[in-house]
């Protein structure tokens, strides 16, 4: 049941609103002035607030300003002395809506329903955002991973291009997403391109887009990832697998901040921060003539080396507990307990697949074990016979 706070100095108005709202199955609380309302807000949570404008002790607009400093709860202003200017001022200061007295019952209920819907959507958005941020959290406090976190904090605020290196499964994408989330571009798009998964003949179309009719299957115009990521971050994963022709076009895009669609005739200005990642030794690839040296220097303003799991074994207990909770929640299961001996046993493995392999193992343990995971389970399930 939604809770509504009614703030009005007229007792008859409060009583009328209470009767109407309780009939509509809302839970109602009252305050005769702004001071009483602010006290109630410190000890109780409300889903919406109806606030009169002309009140003793504290003006309604001042009350609303203080409420907005305390909570995200939508505030609907009410006044019998309303003018268009007053309504505009209330909305400008953050009111959800403005209703004049005498109150139109239908308008009040519709406005209140819309305010509650907005409040629900804001809460749901925050929950989803928190869940997403938690998903991309970098877990661990080893010296090696702390250095990575410190470097992320230093470089995120800048627009510098970054090259992330490390073995498969070490969490290079997590680093890229953390940089994006801490940057001024955080509200912009984060677009990931797996260069190894896209055929060489199609990667230019994926990156830069194409015009209708530019090749046989181009039945309509297509915006490329550089355009889609404009205002945000473009993450070029496994860039060491990109073709030389595509590398040349990426280099031009970085130099000139312009792209041209396949089959196009005009330049398109793009505002994008490029973060690249690779599991290859790009200097060796340069010697082999399979990667452009000038592109390497463009991409590697900052280089972040993500350590393999074998160099941060002390993080395994924290990682295991993190994955146990995350995966159990995904599967709708209770989070199993794991013994200290089992954790120590897990620290003895080589983990050639790094964090990705560890997560897969934890998922296997959740599926195959009971509520308690011990060292016998580790011996049986961590390295199953293929």
Image: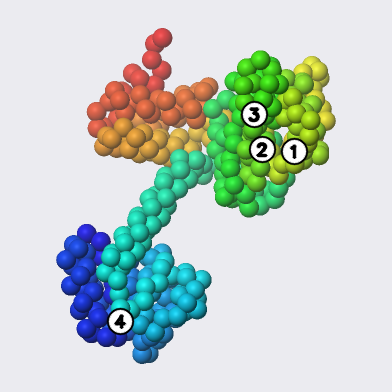
Question: Is the C-beta separation of discs 4 and 2 under 8 Å?
Answer: no
Mark 3 closeness class: few <14, some 14–19, many ≥20 residues within 10 Å? some
Q: Mark 2 points at which residue?
A: 227
Can you say whether 352 is above or below 329 in the image? above
| 296 or 56, nearer to the observer | 56
Q: Which of marks 1 and 3 is nearer the N terminus?
A: 3
Q: Quadrant of the C terminus?
A: top left
Residue ID at (37%, 65%) = 73
Q: Name the residue under label 4.
A: 8
- Gap between marks 2 and 3, in whole Å? 13 Å
Question: Is the C-beta separation of discs 4 and 3 under 8 Å?
Answer: no
Q: Earlier in the sequence, mark 4 or mark 3?
A: 4
Q: Residue furthest top?
A: 386
Mark 3, secondary structure of its residue: loop
Left or right relative to 13: residue 364:
right
| 254 or 164, nearer to the observer | 254
């Amino acid at each position: 049941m939604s809770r509504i706070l009614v703030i009005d100095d007229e007792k008859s108005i409060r009583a009328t609103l209470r009767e109407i709202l309780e009939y509509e199955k809302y839970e109602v609380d009252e305050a005769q002035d702004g001071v009483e309302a602010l006290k109630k807000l410190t000890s109780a949570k409300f889903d919406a607030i109806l606030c009169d404008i002309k009140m003793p002790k504290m003006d309604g607009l001042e009350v609303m300003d203080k409420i907005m400093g305390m909570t995200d709860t939508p505030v609907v202003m009410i006044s019998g002395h309303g003018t268009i200017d007053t309504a505009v001022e209330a909305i400008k200061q953050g009111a959800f809506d403005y209703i004049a007295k005498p109150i139109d019952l239908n308008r009040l209920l519709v406005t209140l329903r819309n305010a509650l819907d907005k409040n629900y959507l804001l809460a749901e958005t925050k929950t989803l955002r928190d869940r997403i941020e938690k998903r991309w959290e970098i877990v661990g406090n080893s010296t090696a991973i702390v250095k990575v976190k410190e470097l992320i904090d230093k470089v995120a605020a800048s627009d510098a291009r970054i090259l992330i290196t490390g073995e498969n499964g070490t969490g290079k994408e997590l680093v890229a997403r953390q940089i994006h989330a801490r940057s001024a571009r955080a509200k912009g798009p984060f677009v990931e391109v797996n260069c190894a998964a896209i055929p060489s003949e199609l990667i230019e179309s994926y990156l830069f887009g194409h015009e209708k009719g530019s090749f046989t299957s181009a039945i309509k115009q297509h915006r490329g990832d550089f355009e889609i990521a404009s205002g945000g971050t473009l993450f070029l994963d496994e860039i060491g697998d990109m073709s030389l022709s595509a590398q040349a076009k990426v280099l031009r895009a970085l130099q000139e901040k312009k792209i041209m669609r396949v089959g196009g005739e005009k330049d398109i200005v793009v505002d994008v921060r490029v973060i690249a990642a690779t599991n290859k030794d790009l200097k060796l690839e340069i010697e082999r003539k399979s990667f452009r040296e000038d592109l390497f220097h463009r991409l590697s303003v900052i280089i972040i080396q993500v350590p393999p799991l074998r160099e941060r074994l002390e993080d395994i207990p924290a990682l295991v507990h993190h994955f146990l909770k995350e995966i159990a929640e995904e599967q709708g299961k209770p989070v199993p307990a794991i013994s200290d001996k089992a954790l120590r046993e897990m620290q003895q493995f080589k983990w050639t697949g790094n964090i990705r392999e560890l997560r897969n193992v934890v998922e296997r343990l959740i599926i195959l074990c009971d509520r308690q995971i011990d060292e016998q389970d580790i011996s049986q399930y961590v390295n199953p016979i293929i």
